[in-house]
Image (spheres, rainbow, N blue to C red):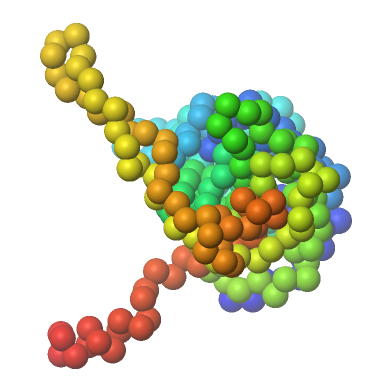
Amino acid sequence: MAYPPLDLAQARVLIANDDGIHAPGLTLLEEVARRLFREVWVVAPETEQSAASHSLTMRRPLYLRQAGERRFTVDGTPTDCVLLAVHQAMQGAPPDLVLSGVNHGGNLGEDATYSGTVAAAMEGTLLGIRSVALSQLYETGAPAHWETAERWSADVLRRLPAFDWPAGVLLNVNFPAVAPSDVLGIEVTKQGRHKIGGTMVEGKDPRGQCWFWIGGERQQDRGLAGTDLAAVHAGAVSVTPLCLELTHQASMSALATVFR
């Protein structure tokens, strides 16, 4: 499937996220989008849905509540938000572009598989819409450089019309934890190695039952050249094309000999 040309000045844009309707990154992205695009819609979770991944709510009803002009909340996941936006809030006139974020924290390496921010862009891609996930890295204990995301997200979005965008591909954008003037530029990268969940805290509740709390520490390799991790930790904006086709083509012929 070929996407039609993208005209920023005429585009209708949907913004979603996983940090919720009141998140500063969402407000920032709205402001940037309103300067670039003709029409901006927001459909975001009522509450934070970080690490919701690409989950759907299917065993209870969802509520789509209006929170302003072209602004809605959903009591569900980021994926729910994009689905309800396209099929209900924007029914009959789907967006030309889905933007998800700006997330408070990076979505690098394997984080993409857990991320609700990336999942919203995945859902847009599955619906046949160009989609971009945007995340702002920050150092633990320090405030996020939201001004970096504001300055450089506009630069990234302005360049999108020149991209010959394949179907089934979404863009995962990460901004480094540095001031806007210290950003080294924009790099196109591959997905790095960045695994969360290597540590756990254990305790007991008042009834003596054991509980476990998954820690936020990550096993990562920042030194792999050409990866999103290497780029952002060096001070560059990382743009990674991710595809929804999960088939490992190189294994097809080998498996065919096993199961023939």
Q: Quadrant location of the C terminus? A: bottom left
Image coords of residue 175 (percent x, y)? 67, 48
Would you say 75 lies left or right of 156 here? left
The extreme front residue here reads 223
Image coords of residue 64 (percent x, y)? 54, 32
Q: Say which of 12 and 30 sits in front.
A: 30
The answer to whether residue 44 shows anywhere in this view is: no
In the image, what residue occupies the spot 72% across and 36% down? 146
Q: Quadrant location of the N terminus? A: bottom right
Would you say 70 lies left or right of 7 here? left
Image coords of residue 168 (percent x, y)? 53, 68
The answer to whether residue 177 shows anywhere in this view is: yes
231 shown above or below 27: below
Q: How many marks?
A: 0
Location of residue 142 by image quarter:
top right
In the image, what residue occupies the spot 57% across and 44% down? 106
Location of residue 230 by image quarter:
bottom right
73 shown above or below 32: above
197 shown above or below 223: above
Q: Say which of 206 and 234 sits in front.
A: 234
145 shown above or below 67: below
Image coords of residue 240 (percent x, y)? 59, 62
In the image, what residue occupies the spot 47% across and 46% down? 115
In the image, what residue occupies the spot 56% across and 63% down? 227
Would you say 149 lies left or right of 245 here? right
Location of residue 68 by image quarter:
top right
